[in-house]
Image: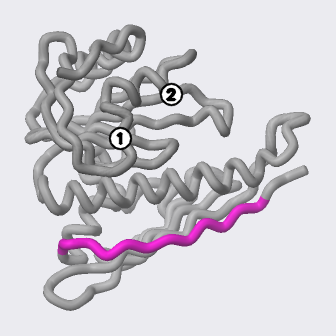
Amino acid sequence: MSHEFDIRTSIALPATPEQVWQAVATPEGQAAWFMAVPTEPDADPSANPAVEIWEPPHRLLVRPDATMALEYLVEAADGGTAVLRLVHSGVLDPPLGVEGWGDEFDAMTRAGWDQYFATLREYLTHFPGRAATYAEAEATGEVWERIRDVLGRPDAPGGRVTIDLAGRTLAGEVDYVTDRFLGLRTDGALIRFHERSAIGMPVAVSHHDYTGADPDELSAAWADWLAAPVPAT
């Protein structure tokens, strides 16, 4: 049976509507907090066939496929800030024989958007306007508990962590904590760990780097790190 979903959320952001629009409506902006979007050099996002409504800096409606829609609404707020509202809707077919998958999808997707929007706020607060490279890696097995160990099993933001990533020292503060997501902010990056077993996907790490690091090298380093995490110091 098909599963209809309609996820709505919003967040107040310390940025102008124009800054928020750049972050949500351009490939360069999305790499800074969401994920890398494949595009041709100098491509015009408004000309993308998936873009149904393009009204900068206030409304963007994207249909990634025939069954899903993402609508971003940006509103000006007091003091040069903005409010971003999201409507993520569509229809999905759950995996065969998986009861309750729709509820799990809703819960995981809502929690995912909470994490992405928190990452967007961190980006606009600590790294506004800085170009980003995006890297990611995945791993299966008992990886999540080892990640929690490395990050000190935090139950709230605020702890300090140091990770050795293929000779690169990542020192920063745990800035996001839930049962399914953990976040680390360093002087030059936002790093997110995702536990996605509820929707049948492997554990993942996403790395938004603002120092010009090579994304392929970062992805390879994280793949190795997930395979054999080392203790924090």
Of residue 208 and residue 27, the one placed in the foreground of this image is: 208
Query: In the rendered structure, does residue 8 fall within the stretch colored magenta?
Result: yes
Q: Is residue 160 left or right of residue 50?
A: left
Q: Is residue 162 left or right of residue 33?
A: left
Q: Is residue 189 visible?
A: no
Quarter of the rendering containing residue 55: bottom left
Q: Bounds of the magenta span? A: 4-15
Q: Are marks 2 and 1 in contact (CB under 8 Å)?
A: no
Residue 227: image location, x then y, percent? 41, 10
Q: Which residue is mark 1?
A: 154
Q: Which residue is mark 2?
A: 203
Q: Which residue appears at 54% of the width and 18% of the height?
A: 142
Judge the density around disc 2: few (<14), some (14-19), many (≥20) Cα neighbours within 10 Å. Answer: many
Q: Earlier in the sequence, mark 2 or mark 1?
A: 1
Q: Which residue appears at 12% of the width and 22% of the height?
A: 169
Q: Secondary structure at mark 1?
A: loop
Question: Among all residues in the image, which is located at the extreme bottom?
Answer: 78
Residue 7: image location, x then y, percent? 60, 66
Q: Secondary structure at mark 2?
A: strand
Foreground: disc 2 or disc 1: 1
Quarter of the rendering containing residue 45: bottom left
| Location of residue 218 with respect to 187 vertically, above or below | above
Under mark 2, the amino acid is Val
Of residue 204 and residue 39, the one placed in the foreground of this image is: 204
Q: Which residue appears at 52% of the width and 35% of the height?
A: 195
Q: Look at the magenta stretch and give its main secondary structure.
A: strand
- Quadrant of the image containing the C terminus: top left
